[in-house]
Image (cartoon, rainbow, N blue to C red):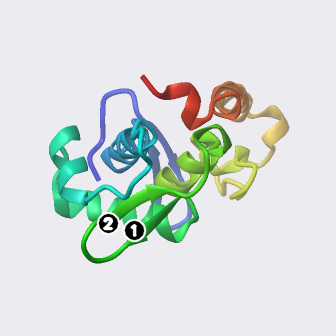
Amino acid sequence: MRLYPGSLLCLLSDFVYIRSMLSKKTKYGLKALTFLANQKNKEPVQIAEIARHENISQKFLESILLTLRRTGFLGSKKGKGGGYYLIKEPSEILMTAVIRVLEGPIAMVPCVSLNFYEKCDDCPDEDSCSVHKLMLQVRDSVLEVYRNNTLADIIV
């Protein structure tokens, strides 16, 4: 993993939990979803067309679209006229769900995660931990934005 200046490091028992920027996987997944949402005819779109339009590696995009299909955001059709398409209305696709599928936990440290909580081994008391208090505020602010946005809200 690459460390970025200012990234948050939380040492846990046998691994390092790092969260600094939105991954390319998530960024490209959001771009692909908005591309599909902008299709007026709602017909399946081939990976090559999405990749070309959004300037994404076709092989990388294929992996992302498979993840989105397996998790219920997309459908796919094989053969002539095949490709990927949204199976929900853009207004029904919550950003919290998309981010969790593509990025993983929203919280920057596991001790404040709503769905993936883990106690930090180096912290004897979360209530008096300044990092914990700050990361609760960060998590809540980020969740506020994600919860109040759907795919329909981010279409340009």
Numbered disc 1: secondary structure: helix
What number is the disc on residue 35?
A: none
* Labelled pair 1, 2 in contact (Cβ < 8 Å): yes
Kindly indicate the quadrant of the structure image that contains residue 143: top right
Q: What residue is drawn where x is 24% and y is 72%?
A: 80
Q: What residue is drawn where x is 64% and y is 42%?
A: 94
What number is the disc on residue 63?
A: 2
Numbered disc 2: secondary structure: helix
In this rendering, is residue 66 above or below 109? below
Relative horizontal placement of residue 145, taking residue 20 as reference (left or right): right
Asked if residue 107 shows in the view, the reply is no
Near-viewer residue (67 or 11): 67
Across and down, in percent, residue 81 comes to 28, 66
Assess disc 2: are there few (<14), some (14-19) or many (≥20) residues with their C-alpha within 10 Å of its C-alpha: few
Q: What residue is drawn where x is 39% and y is 36%?
A: 21
Asked if residue 144 shows in the view, the reply is yes
> Which residue, given by chain and number where applicable, does mark 1 sit on?
66
Relative horizontal placement of residue 110, taking residue 9 as reference (left or right): right
Across and down, in percent, residue 18 comes to 44, 47
Q: Quadrant of the C terminus?
A: top left
Across and down, in percent, residue 63 comes to 32, 66
